[in-house]
Amino acid sequence: MTASRIALVTGATQGLGRALVEGLAAHMAAHDLVLLTGRDQERVHGAAAAVAADRATARVEGRVLDVRDADAIAEASTPSTPSSASGAKRSTMAAPSRRASAPG
């Protein structure tokens, strides 16, 4: 059996993030996990339930995550389930950091 993979998608309750979760969930294996994350608990759980009920092959879980919170990032990147704690390969997808630039 191949090691389980975990894909963490930020900003995934709508738009491109949601589409990415749907694609990953449909094409990853049943023992893989797609973590759908966002800042609003209701939207996160609603979106995760909708994706999981649609055509998902992989497991889909919703997690509240604000990428501006360093402690939340550290917590999200720590495996919390027995299957992922046993050497699972993690694939993290996040937006690159943005630097404010001066106008002009």
Image (cartoon, rainbow, N blue to C red):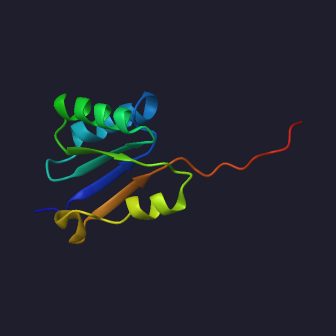
Q: Would you say 95 lies left or right of 20 here?
A: right
Residue at 29 percent across and 55 percent down: it is: 6
Is residue 69 among the parts visible in the rendering?
Answer: yes
Q: Would you say 22 lies left or right of 12 here?
A: left
Q: Position of residue 65 (x, y in %)?
A: 43, 49
Q: Quadrant of the C terminus?
A: top right
Residue at 36 percent across and 56 percent down: it is: 91
The number of discs equals 0
Residue at 23 percent across and 34 percent down: it is: 49
- Establish if 89 lies above or below 37: below
Q: Relative to the observer, which residue lies in front, 1 or 99?
A: 99
Is residue 55 among the parts visible in the rendering?
Answer: no
Q: Relative to the observer, which residue lies in front, 102 or 76?
A: 76
Q: Quadrant of the N terminus?
A: bottom left
Quadrant of res 22: top left
Q: Position of residue 7 (x, y in %)?
A: 33, 51
Q: Would you say 56 lies left or right of 8 here?
A: left
Quadrant of res 2: bottom left
Q: Position of residue 29 (x, y in %)?
A: 17, 48
- For this orientation, the residue located farthest to the left is 1
Q: Relative to the observer, which residue lies in front, 47 or 93?
A: 47
